[in-house]
Amino acid sequence: MEYALPTPAAPLKIGTRGSPLALAQAHETRGRLMEAFDLPEEAFEICVIKTTGDDRTLIDADIALKTIGNKGLFTKEIEEAMIDRRIDIAVHSTKDMPVEQPAGLVLDVFLPREDVRDAFVSLKYASIADLPQGAVVGTSSLRRRAQLQVKRPDLKLVEFRGNVQTRLQKLADGVADATFLAMAGLNRMNMTDVPAHAIAPEDMLPAIAQGTIGIEYRADDLRARQMLAKLHHPETGLRLAAERAFLAALDGSCETPIGGLAMLEGTQLWLRGEILSPDGQIVFTGERRGPVGGGAAMGRDLAEELLDQAGPDFFKAVAEG
C-alpha cells in the first residue's frame, strides 16, 4: 500500500450537500469505505456544503432552475472546497453533474446503480392517466415537463422544488395535484410511505445517470484514487460512459430537455435517447445497440443522429424560447 489510511485523528473528509438524500448517499459511501478497509466511522468526516441550488429562498419561491443557471447549481461550491483541499472527496447525484469537471478533478467512480425510474407522486391519483382534465402538476425538471406535455397537453404545470418532505407538504397544501420524484432517492431513504408509483422507462425516459452516486476526487490524490477504486461498480461505469457521452455531444449545458438510458444485455449495451422542445411539441428519439465497451462511441453517434434530425436551429430556438 502506497498511502496511509485515514484515522480518527486524520479523517478522510467527504463533501456533500445537506439534503436528506445527499446525506444518505454520503453515509452509503462512508459505509462502503469502512467495510472495504475495515475502518471505524470516526476515520471519516462528512462535511456539509451549501450549494447555490440549496438556497432556501429560491426553493420556497419555486424559482425555476433555468433562471439561475442549471450548470453546476448543486456542485460548484463542493468542487471549490475540494480544489481548496478543504475536503478530500465529494459524493454527488451523478445526474446533477456537468459532463466536464473543473481542471484537476476526476469523476470516474460510480456506486451500483439504483432504480432508474421516475416516480409519479400524488395524494389523490395513482397515475398520469388518472389525472383529471386541467389538473396541476408540479415539477422543476425541464425533461419531465416536456415529456408530460407530450402525453397530457391539457395539464397545468407549475414550478415545484424542495426535498421529498417539502414537496409532499406542497401536495397536501393543494399547490399541485401531483409531482415526480426519482425512485432511487425514495429507495435510498427507505421512504416506503410515500404514495409513489414507478413509471416505466418506455413511458418516461429518465435523466442521464439517474439513480447513480458518483464520487469525485482530485487527480493528484493517489490515496483517494486507490481507495475509491475498490468501490467502483464496473457495470454502472459502462452504462454511464454511453449516457454521459450522449449528453456531452448534445452539450449538456443547454436548456434542452434530454432523456437517456443505457442497459446491459449480456455482452451488448442498449442505449436509448431523446431530445424534446420544452413544450413537448417536438420529440426526436433514437437508440443504439453494440458491444458494452463501445458505449462512449455509441453515445456520440446517437447524439449526432438526433442533432441531424433536429436541425441546426433546434437548440437555438429552445434557448430563445
Image (cartoon, helix red, strand yellow):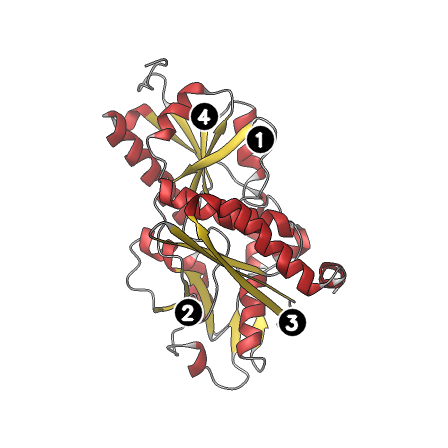
Foreground disc of the pair 4, 3: 3
Q: On the picture, is 168 further left or further right than 149?
A: left
Q: Are marks 1 and 2 in contact (CB under 8 Å)?
A: no
Total numbered circles: 4
State the SS at label 3. Answer: loop
User: From what the image shows, is residue 199 above or below residue 106?
Assistant: below
Question: Which residue in the structure is indicated by mark 3?
Answer: 282
Question: Which residue in the structure is indicated by mark 4?
Answer: 88
Q: Amino acid at mark 2?
A: Phe
Q: Earlier in the sequence, mark 1 or mark 3?
A: 1
Q: Are marks 1 and 3 in contact (CB under 8 Å)?
A: no
Q: Amino acid at mark 1?
A: Glu
Cα–Cα span, label 1 and label 3:
38 Å
Question: Which residue in the structure is indicated by mark 1?
Answer: 80
Q: Are marks 2 and 4 in contact (CB under 8 Å)?
A: no
Cα–Cα span, label 3 and label 2:
23 Å
Q: Residue at x 36, y 22 (%)?
A: 11
Question: Which residue in the structure is indicated by mark 2?
Answer: 120
